[in-house]
Image: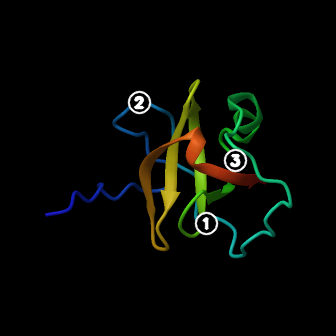
Amino acid sequence: MAFLPPFISPGQQTPQGSGQTPPGPPPQFTPQQPLTTTFAVDPGAISGCLFRYTYIWPQSGPGFWFYPVFVGRTSVSGFRWNGFFWTFFGMDLRQINSFTCF
């Protein structure tokens, strides 16, 4: 049985205490992927996207909308849009091919 994160309403305080959820759904477009790719994303670079709608292109799999609320030395966590609602999510910075935020 797969674990499904609980539904989190926009603006609701998270149980993890990591901040508030995004104010609403992400933009309704997919941005153009930057031409440059990296071996690993620098924490300082992605920290400029904290609490902003961010589009992530992972090393494998399709891109997705993300709303980061925490950036660590080797990871980032926040909320991932699943097409219907936001779920809490985290990933290793080495798994990110590129990103852009708005």
Q: Please indicate, yes or no, whether residue 25 appears anywhere in the rendered image.
A: yes
**Dot 1: element:** loop
Q: Residues within 10 Å of mark 1 (few under 14, many from 20)?
A: some
**Relative depth, front residue between 17 and 49:** 49
Residue bearing the label numbered 1:
63
71 to 98, vertically: above or below: above
**Dot 2: element:** loop
Of the two numbered discs 3 and 1 in the rendering, the one whose residue sits closer to the viewer: 1
Q: Please indicate, yes or no, whether residue 23 appears anywhere in the rendered image.
A: no
**Dot 3: element:** loop
Instruction: Say left or right for 15 vs 82.
Output: left
Indicate the amino acid at tag 3. Arg
Residue bearing the label numbered 2:
17
Indicate the amino acid at tag 2. Gly
First reached walking from the N terminus: tag 3 or tag 2: 2
Residue bearing the label numbered 3:
52
Q: Position of residue 90 (x, y in %)?
A: 46, 43
